[in-house]
Structure formats: C-alpha cells, structure tokens
Image (spheres, grey):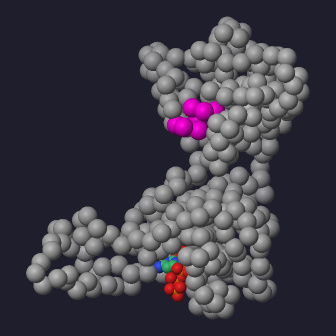
Amino acid sequence: MLASKRILLIIGGGIAAFKSLDLIRRLRERGADVTPVLTRAGGAFVTPLSVSALAGEKLHSDLFDLTAEAEMGHIELSRSADLIVVAPATADLMAKMAHGLADDLASTLLLATDTRVLIAPAMNVRMWQHPATQRNIATLKSDGILFSGPNDGDMACGEHGPGRMSEPLEIVTAIEAALANGPLSGKRILVTSGPTHEPIDPVRYIANRSSGAQGTALARALSALGAEVIFVTGPAEVPPPKGVEVRAVKTAQEMLEAVKAALPVDAAVFAAAVADWRMTEPARNKMKKSKSGLKQLDFTENPDILATVAHMNKGRPPLVVGFAAETDDVVRNAINKRKRKGCDWIVANDVNPATGIMGGSHNDIVLITHDGTEDWPRMSKTQVAAQLADRIAQALG
Ligand code: CTP
C-alpha cells in the first residue's frame, strides 16, 4: 500500500502520456498523494485540466511561475516527495537527466532533488537502441536512478521492439518496491568514504588516490535496502548518493568528530582511505621556495577512526566493518589488521597498482570474519556493495 506516500509525477512528452492518467488514478486508489508536473511536450498529449483533476492537486508546469514559487519553491517541491516518478521518460528527458541540464521545471526538479527517482522510459525502438541513449541509461543507472521497463511490443509508430512504456500497474509495483520497507529499514548505518586532505599550508595538502567509489556504492546499496545511512565523506571524486545524510569533512580529525557525532548506529562501515599522517603544524601562510631547499616537514599520526570506534567500551556499534587496502600478502595482513583494529569484519582488497583497483570500477575482495576468510570473485564495486549490504542485512536481521 502507498498510504500517505507523496509521489511527484513528472509527465514527459510522448504518446504514452495517456497511460500516466491511469497511473495517477491507480496511485490515488492506493492512498498515495500525487503532485503532477507536466512538461511542455507532455502538454501536447494530455491536458493540464485532466491531469490536475485526476490528481486532485495543483499542476506544476512552469519554472518561472511566481505564484507557485511563493507558495512552494521548486527546490522544496523537488524534495518534499517520497519518490519522484518520471512517466513517460522520453529520450530527451533522460539525456537531460544524464547530463545535468536544467532548462525547464521538470529537469530543474530532477537536478535539484535529493529524493530517489524512478523512471518509466517510452520511446521509439531505434531511439532506445541508439548508443547515445544507451550511454545515458548506463549513466542514470550508475547514478542510482530506478527503472520500470521499457517493455517489448508494438509501438504507436508501427515498429516493434523495446521502448513501450510499462503498463500503469507495472509502474505501481515498481513504486511499491521502491518505497517498501527493506530488510534494513529502521537500522541506522554509518559509512565513511573518500580520502582525507591534510593541509601542509593554505594551498597544499596531502591526499591519496581514493575516489570514494566503493564507499558511495555501499551507502547507496544500504539505503536501497531501507537503512538510514549517515555518510561521512572526505573530498571524494564521485558525488554522494541521493537519499543519504551527507556529512562532508576534509581531514581525519574532522572525520573522527563527525563519526562520533553520528553514534549510536547499528553498524558502522569504514570505507574511507584516511591519511595516516598529518602535518604537526600546517603553515599559516603559503610556504615559499628558499635557497636552503625544502624545509623539514614534521608529521603527527592521525587518530585511527576505525580502531577508536571498534574499541569503544560504551556505545560500540554491534557490527563494525573495516576495509584493508593492501599491496602484498593481502590475507595475512588483513587478518592481523582485523585483530589489531578490533573490528568484526575486514573487507580486504589488493590495491597494488598492477590491479587497477584503486580509482577503478572493479574490486577483488576477501572478506575476513571471525569464521574465517571468503574469497569473492572479481566484480564491480556496485556488485561488491550490493553483496556486502546483503551480508550486513543478514547480520543485523
Ligand atoms: N582507518 C581509519 N582511520 C585511520 C586509518 C584507517 O578509520 N586513521 C580505517 C580505514 O577506513 C579502513 C581501515 O582502517 O577501514 C584500514 O585502512 P588501511 O589504510 O588499510 O590501514 P592502515 O590503518 O593504514 O594500516 P597499515 O598502514 O598498516 O596498512
């Protein structure tokens, strides 16, 4: 059931828009509130009056509607829903979403939102198969956008193949699944991610090559299983996932403070590549070249965030998971690391430059628990995240 769920429904321009009228009816029958947004092209296929009459709500269509802006700004509109649904999602709307364009109300809402988005694509089969659309689909999937369809079948244009919008009841099922309580619902999980930057002077810092890809994928996978995720991230290359609570930090010390402030949690996963060292006293002004060469830099060890949390007497999360980035003797080093750091599991990976894992899209994992070691086959960081999220759900279940 969808009782009291708020759905922001964006209706794009396509012949399938007529099915969206039925979708509105089906959603309201199940207790959902539907706020409709009609694109200009969508308005060529269904009338604003029929959309707002079926939704029982004001229709939004204009980015520069000052009355609407005074009542509820478009940023708020984009965030007040439990789920944004785009049906039909045209090739053009999908391209705008994939590239971050925001030239009308629908695309601006999609760019401004931090709510999950589910799209029901509808287009001619050749448009769907075009490499440009396929690239956009891959981008949208990796951004965490959920898809319903398209289906194979006869199309209004007389061709046959993939591109038909899902039927309204199929979209309703996808919406229910997206909003369903997953196995981690009610659980609060902390994830650290990304590198840390340790200042040398106001313009220089020490960093590492972590892109934040694995931590981000994990936060997304945990959130997809219904967890409330607190995502403490250093300055990562990849943007944080939607729908998680982001606490951005720069240094290891800031990360430790953000982690402590996030407790208590049911599980904590430390995927960040924290700098082990920081300058004891970063220079206040930019360091200048001098005849005597580079001055000696004095370093202090950073706090070990994982070990600090894993060794807490009071308030230790029931499940503490660390990562181990190793370049040699991966398993032995990781087993020792698990003992030394006091965590429950270690997710070990080989970051030898020859493996291409650091900053790459795949990962070779050995999971180390108190029961022993498990070798996982090479898989994408997204798959690693999904598998690890499943294991966490089992452990907390
Ligand atoms: N970690 C942390 N705080 C630190 C250093 C590491 O929380 N100051 C966490 C990482 O997030 C990761 C785990 O500890 O989950 C292991 O990180 P890794 O860099 O592999 O280990 P190190 O502590 O640096 O150990 P070593 O230098 O012996 O490899």
State which quarter of the image contains the N terminus: top right
Residue that appears at 80% across and 67% down? 394
Q: Quadrant of the C terminus?
A: bottom right
- Residue 13 in view: yes
**Residue 149 vertical placement versus 57 (above, below):** below
User: Which image quadrant is residue 355 in?
Assistant: bottom right
Which residue is depicted at the point 85% across and 17% down? 158
Residue at 28 percent of width and 68 percent of height? 204
Rendered location of residue 90, percent (x, y): 68, 26
Q: Is residue 218 visible?
A: no
The reply, left or right, for residue 264 in relation to residue 396 is left
Determine if the magenta segment contains residue 154.
no
Looking at the rendering, the stretch of residues picked out in magenta corresponds to 94-100
Up/down of 290 relative to 264, above or below: below
Q: Quadrant of residue 26?
A: top right
Does 23 sit above or below residue 214?
Answer: above
Q: Position of residue 209 (x, y in %)?
A: 48, 69
Give x and y (percent) for residue 362. 66, 65
Magenta stretch: dominant secondary structure = helix
